[in-house]
Image: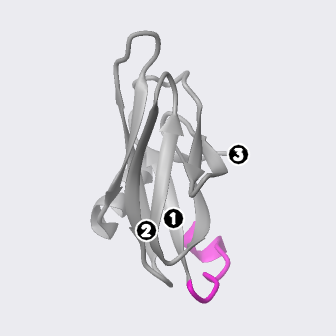
């Protein structure tokens, strides 16, 4: 799939958000970066979004809003793996930035979210 992606714009980095587990598969939650919805977290799914380089705030809202800071590196792929934990009413999805090798490995079993 890498060969079909357009080049990354100058001053931006490509952020891949993925959820490698099928636990909580039915839960689809909006992913917000710097107060803007950029995609949806889905079980065994991923999407990408180009974001300005620097520290960004990412959050995913299910029963509660879970957020984290990520460091977007210009011209590079950046990976955010989402883990799922049980909640009172529904599962919680926690975004965490991972290194490139981990992200490329874990995203292999995920499908592009449409």
Q: Which of 27 and 70 is in front in this view?
A: 70
Separation of residues labelled 2 and 3 (CA atoms): 20 Å
Above or below, 50 against 58 in this view is: below
Q: Nearer the viewer, residue 14 or 33?
A: 33
In screen coordinates, is 104 left or right of 43? left
Say whether marks 1 and 2 touch (CB < 8 Å). yes
User: Does the magenta-highlighted stretch encompass residue 106?
Assistant: no
Pointer 3 local density, CA inside 10 Å: few below 14, some 14–19, many at least 20? few
Dot 1 lies on which element? strand
State the extent of the magenta-drawn residues as a range. 1-11
Q: Which residue is drawn at 38% across and 34% down?
A: 21
Question: Can you tell which mark lies on residue 78?
Answer: 2
Above or below, 61 against 90 in this view is: below
On the image, the x and y values in percent for residue 77 come to: 46, 73
Q: Residue at x 70, y 45 (%)?
A: 114
Say whether marks 3 and 1 touch (CB < 8 Å). no
Q: Mark 1 points at which residue?
A: 15
């Amino acid at each position: 799939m890498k060969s079909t992606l357009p080049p990354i714009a100058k001053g931006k980095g490509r952020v891949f958000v993925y959820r490698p587990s099928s636990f909580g598969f039915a839960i689809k939650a909006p992913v917000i970066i710097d107060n803007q919805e950029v995609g949806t977290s889905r079980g065994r799914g991923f999407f990408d979004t180009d974001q300005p380089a620097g520290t960004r705030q990412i959050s995913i809202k299910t029963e509660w809003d879970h957020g984290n800071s990520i460091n977007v590196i210009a011209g590079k792929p950046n990976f955010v793996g989402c883990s799922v934990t049980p909640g009172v009413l529904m599962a919680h999805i926690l975004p965490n930035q991972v290194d490139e090798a981990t992200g490329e490995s874990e995203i292999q079993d995920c499908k592009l979210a449409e």
